[in-house]
Image: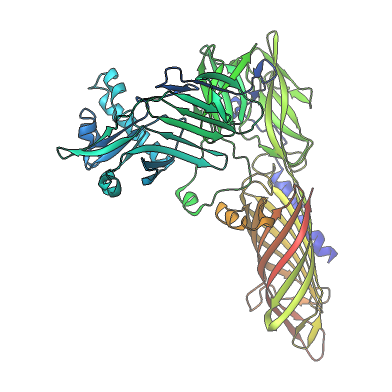
Amino acid sequence: MAKFFSSFFTMMVLACGALMGAPATALAQGAEDYTVPLRFDVIGDGVTQLPLELDYDLTSESELRIGDTVISAQSFQMRVGTLDEISPVAAPYAGEDLRRGVNLLLSWPLPLIPDGYLEAIGQSGRVLWQSAIPQSEVQNWIATTAELRTRMQANVKKEDLDANPLLASSWIFRDFLTNAPELAESQENFRVCISRQTDQGQTRLCSAYMGLKNRNRKWHLEDVPEPKKPARIISFQKQSPLKSRRRLKGRGPVQFLAELNNGFIYEFVTRPPKIEIVELVHGDKENIKIVGFGQAPSMAHRILNPLEESFIMRTFRWQETIGDFRRFWEVDAPKGLTTLYFPGPSGGLFKQVFKITRLPRETSRPFIDYRTPDSTYVNDAKVYGIRADKTKVSSKENSLEMDGDSADEFLWRFKHEERGQMKRAHVEVQDGEETFKAYYEMYKGYPRELSFRSSAILGSGGNLLINAEGAFNYWFEDLFGWSNATWSRQRWGLATKYYQSLTPLKISNTTALMRNTTIDLKYRLRPGLWGRDESWGLMMGYNENVYDMFKPKMLGAGFFWARSMPRLFDDLLNKVPIMRYPKWVDMDFVYYPTLSGSQGASLNQIPSGGGNWALNFHGKVMWTKSFFGEAGFGIRNLDQNQDVDSALVRRLRFQFTSIYYTMGLGYQF
């Protein structure tokens, strides 16, 4: 066994040695490889992020300004009719499909309510009709109106485009009368309300009362004359001034109700948004670039890392459930802008003021290699970067060395001491007389897993076995300090497993315990961390199975796949309280074509049966950052012929097919 075991590891070492024939060099091969920006950590160092404010003004009584958005009879409108009736100018550009039928066209301030439900509420308080307003439909309609505007630009004046009701609309309900016959048949006047509810609160915007009328065979909405009532504001459960700017303390619920004198109502109950600012910098055109994640501001912005999902992933809900799901946004603000407005999770707009004393220049930003991982197993991960012209970079947290062959390139050792956490590490950027901190973020994972399991095995011949099992896995940050992104960095892992049957296995006239040892060398086809980043991979396996006189040692090859639990199954399992934690699943298949027997015996390499192979499915649920429960199932097949020195029996065959289920506990560190 020792000789065979030694040969197996010699093969692995030679394979690694062949891959490492090239010298250990930096990841980057040229300046074009440095494309990932380091962000400037300016909050608390040149920029003060003041507490959020609730800022509103209803002094005109018929128009409510909340944040930078206005609710009025002009911004909240609804029209019923064909497109030719609603907008004779735009209708010819819309196409025949859109021009057919009587439609309901709505306009409302989208930053306040991006999607939700549309209701017609009668004067009796009864809901006469309702419909969902999916966000996808709103986005599609906005894209449609933008395309119409482009078509019309050459023939229509800009002021006419801006005033066009079709182009200003937020959403269209096609074939309105066909889909809402109960509203057309009702004689009751009603309000049109748009509402939205989340687990953090709710919001609603309602019009004044109106009626749906048919005159001269044309349907339209008519306002119902009502005596005007004084406008009022109720906030934080009490009557409030018509104009106020209130600074919020903490993240407690915010209640707000506004009644306009024209009958409009706007209300919300929500927690304030959590504003996550990544950086503020001076742009190259006298502008200020503001980057954050999570809740985006109400003003125009772009998403830096938009969500990209295939049709299959969306349809079957195959999304990842472990990882960094932050969506980063960027605002290109004019010079001098110190205020942004952010929608609340369930309504409202909140004012965020920045007090700025100094900002770094975007042109002083350092960049790092595009192959730099966003996670690591070690405390001193290598980060290769390049400084900007006329700047200096240094680090007080871990070492930073300038490349001897280039005055601009540097090697930075990323300091990260706490596993299971996303952490920022900083370099200092000196730009003239000013010094700013730039940072990169990495998650530090767990390279080692130790677990103990118990298995129930149902095998051929009606055998039922109970096994005790131990497993240990280790994943390497790189091979001996070699940072090659293709062949070394976060690619290799070693998995070992040993199990011993606690009940005997009986085959023919032989009854004995069985034990098994496996050692697998794994290579990820996509770099990343085990327990966090999805990957397919290849594996080379060693297996030693001992049953009575059968003691084969086998070499094999196979593949594996590992990822977080898909969203579809994660949501189902989360119905069980003990399963409401992050989950990781993996599977592997290995086939053993090469066998050798124990000393003094020979073993056929390719038996006449189904061969020697194993298919395993495994999953774990992380109850804490380190402690997990696990379960798995699989199929194994053993098929071996062995010659023995016996006067009675010259050849024995050991054939055993089994399915198993296992459960256990583990610890990662």
Q: Is residue 483 visible?
A: no
- Measured from the top left, where is residue 560 in percent x and y? 64, 57
- Measured from the top left, where is residue 598 in percent x and y? 81, 73
- Given the current orientation, which residue lies at the most extreme left position? 216
Occupied quadrant, residue 148:
top left
If the image is split into quadrants, where does the N terminus sit?
Answer: bottom right
- Measured from the top left, where is residue 96 in percent x and y? 21, 40
Relative depth, front residue between 35 and 200 = 200
Q: Is residue 625 left or right of residue 308?
A: right
Occupied quadrant, residue 504:
bottom right
Residue drawn at 65 percent across, 56 percent down: 585
Residue drawn at 63 percent across, 17 percent down: 388
Q: Is residue 254 left or right of residue 496?
A: left
- Given the current orientation, which residue lies at the most extreme bottom position? 648
- Measured from the top left, where is residue 335 in percent x and y? 53, 12
Q: Is residue 183 left or right of residue 632?
A: left
Numbered marks: total: 0
Relative depth, front residue between 334 and 525 = 334
